[in-house]
Amino acid sequence: MARKKLDEIRPEDDASARRTPMREFSRSLPMSLLRAREAVMRQFRPSLRNHGLTEQQWRILRALTAVDEIEVTELARVAFLLGPSLSRILRDLEARALIERRAAENDARRAVVSISAKGLKLIEAVAPTSEVIYAAITKRYGARKLAELQEMLGALEASLAGMGSAGEAEVEAED
Amino acid sequence: MARKKLDEIRPEDDASARRTPMREFSRSLPMSLLRAREAVMRQFRPSLRNHGLTEQQWRILRALTAVDEIEVTELARVAFLLGPSLSRILRDLEARALIERRAAENDARRAVVSISAKGLKLIEAVAPTSEVIYAAITKRYGARKLAELQEMLGALEASLAGMGSAGEAEVEAED
DNA sequence: GGGAGATGATTAACATGTTAAGTGAATTCC
DNA sequence: GGAATTCACTTAACATGTTAATCATCTCCC
């Protein structure tokens, strides 16, 4: 495992109880990603809100339009939601009759979900505006640059995929 | 607007009741940003958790180490948190004696916050691990590429800055 | 200098993120 | 073939995101 040799990486730790300077913080990678995403979502939220949808509900309905039906676990993976969040949202969407749910054939544990006609209708009402917004963003930022950005984001994800969190060593103290 | 030419992207959509194809969804910009950020934060969360801090609490304490004191509104801007979230978190951090709060001199509405000695100590306990993780990410992804990514994220943010959300037109129906 | 409006911060209310625990159904393994 | 384990959710509990409403100042302006 690659774990030592990282000790010498921070030469700017000046002596004495100096407050660790670190990155200027506003320039840290997580902050950059957070702000970029927020800048993007700020464009979409008002439109979704006008249709009574949250970002996550939209993600789910959107994912459902791409398939006939799908198991909950797979839906969680595709819509990138944690199980508990998905559970709650599906309950609400089902109550609003935007989706339908049934049990899987061979396995009573699994639930299978699909979008309803009403849900489809809602999606079709929202999609045009979303497309306009997406097109506007693409135009502003540049289609080529956008594609490049997405590729770099994918690469980042990939390069971190098998990196078993360095902070884990600290855990062994408890239980 | 660009909406046709997308029809041929999904050859597995059988005919009938055409569901709007749109981007393949998992490749949408918001999803790319979300997944990338999650991949990054997944690395940091365990360490923060071991020290009893959430990501947002860490952001706040981290921002406070860079200044002597700061007004709440300004802190919200720097730590990129909404007022209500910040209010709650400051209440908790103050209860844990990790920060201190006082009223501004000339304006009783404003509150001024600073990190306490205890808070500083906590930061100094967490920072080394965070640095190691950040260094590992940088090494994996490549320092140059990382810088380029950050620059592109900043540019995206900037290009969307003055873009008054296209969905707003739909609002006029209510109120 | 006092009232209307603006401002800074908090509270309220609801939805989601996050981890842990619970529940019922399938698998495994002797 | 039945107890132990694993699996697919679901609930629970707490923290944050998000918008609206509230509260206490402050400012402006007459």
Image (cartoon, coloured by chain):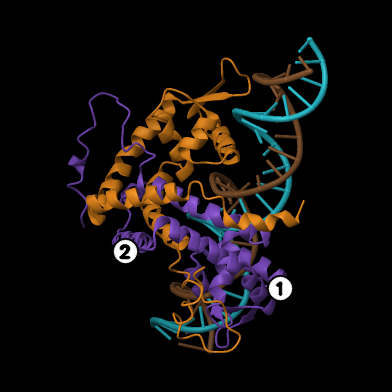
Chain colours: A purple, B orange, C cyan, D brown
Judge from the rendering whether residue D8 lies leftward or rightward of residue B61; answer left or right: right
Secondary element at tag 2? helix
Indicate which disc, 1 or 2, sits on the residue closer to the N terminus. 1
Of A42 and A106, the residue lying toward us: A42
The subunit carrying tag 2 is A
Q: Is residue B83 visible?
A: yes
Determine which residue is flagged by label 2: A158
Quadrant housing residue A71 = bottom right
Identify which residue is drawn at 37% across, 54% down. Answer: B40
Tag 1 and tag 2, C-beta contact below 8 Å: no
Q: Is residue B77 above or below residue A54?
A: above
Judge from the rendering whether residue A31 lies leftward or rightward of residue A21; answer left or right: right
Residue A56, given in percent of the width and then of the height, sits at 57, 62
Identify which residue is drawn at 30% across, 51% down. Answer: A166
Of A136 and B175, the residue lying toward us: A136
Q: Is residue A22 above or below residue A48?
A: above
Determine which residue is flagged by label 1: A97
Q: Is residue B165 above or below residue A53?
A: above
Residue B110, given in percent of the width and then of the height, sits at 59, 24
Q: Residues within 10 Å of mark 2 (few under 14, many from 20)?
A: some
**Quick check: do tags 1 and 2 share a chain?**
yes
Q: Residues within 10 Å of mark 1 (few under 14, many from 20)?
A: some
Quadrant housing residue B168 = bottom right
Q: Which mark is residue B149?
A: none
The subunit carrying tag 1 is A
Residue type, numbered disc 2: Ala
Residue type, numbered disc 1: Ala
Residue A105, given in percent of the width and then of the height, sits at 58, 88
Q: CA distance from mark 1 to mark 2?
A: 37 Å
Identify which residue is drawn at 58% across, 38% down. Answer: B83
